[in-house]
Amino acid sequence: MSDLLTIRDLHAGYGRSEVLFGVNLAIPAGKVTTLMGRNGMGKTTTVRCMMGLLRPRAGEIRLGGTNLVGAPPYRVARAGLGLVPEGRQIFPSLTVIENLRATARPRAGGWTEAKVLDAFPRLAERRNNLGFQLSGGEQQMLATGRALMTNPDLLILDEATEGLAPLIRAEIWALLGRLKAEGLTILLIDKNIEELSRISDHYHVIEKGEIVWQGDARAFAAERESVSRYLHL
């Protein structure tokens, strides 16, 4: 099994504060990888480095043979990384359709506007609504659809189901199951261990800016009790 993306000895922080202390992480192609840990342990900082939103102080982020460190966010997106960010960050003054088209990267046989609206019927009903007129759950659907419209090789979801109503969470988890079945490579950051255990192939646990445990789904199931001390379950 080959890795689509690898992170080696990643160090990063903000100002004088160091957040990541040599993170190593591998994301196998065609699999679902989960990055877990308590709040403030470095999950989102890792994602920000991957997306070019924060320049690491040291280390490599390789997509295939390309080192993404130093690349601006638009080049990272063009290289094949799609992000559903924490907090959604949709464009509030654009309509649903305009949000979907704003960063779209067409690909033959890939995700289109029609395909996204079919996956999220609520968005189809509100296609002409502005972003700020949507509920939190609808905004999350829109953020997910917008990322899919870039037709990424790696889809990254940072707390994509946090704070959502159960029905909307269920829709998003069902879509993730479909994307996995289609062979899309996915990196998930989420706190819902039960749902993660149904979809994840590989787990990485981060504690104070370092990966302290990693393993496949079978190892996680066997060691879940001991791993839980890092997760406050």
Image (cartoon, helix red, strand yellow):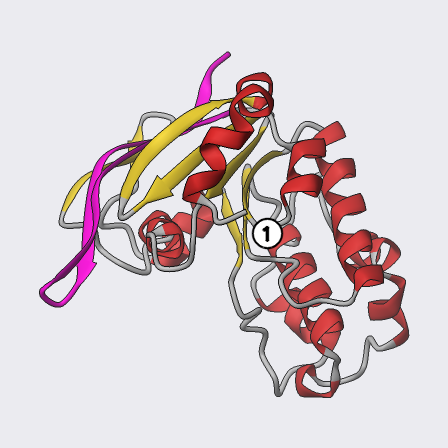
Residue 165's x, y, as percent? Answer: 78, 67
* Foreground of the two, 162 or 140: 162
State the residue at coordinates (27%, 48%). 208
Check if residue 206 falls in the magenta segment. Answer: no
Q: Is residue 25 left or right of residue 100?
A: left
Toward the viewer: 195 or 99? 195
Q: Give the residue at mark 1.
A: 150
Residue 160 locus on image (x, y percent): 61, 57
Q: Nearer the viewer, residue 87 or 218?
A: 218
Res 15 quadrant in image: bottom left
| Relative image position of residue 53 (x, y in whole percent) | 32, 60
The amino acid beneath tag 1 is Thr
Residue 105, percent from left and from top:
59, 52
Which residue is situated farthest in the left direction here? 16
Residue 2 part of the magenta-drawn span: yes
Q: Which residues are magenta?
A: 1-28
In this view, 200 is above or below 171:
above
Position of residue 9 relative to residue 159, above or below, is above
Residue at point 67%, 66% (across, down): 140
Total labels: the figure holds 1
Residue 109 in view (yes/no)? no
Q: Secondary structure at mark 1?
A: loop
Is residue 100 depicted above or below 46 in this figure?
Answer: below
Report which quarter residue 168 is drawn in.
Answer: bottom right
The majority secondary structure of the magenta stretch comes to: strand
- For image coordinates 43% across by 40% down, the residue present is 229
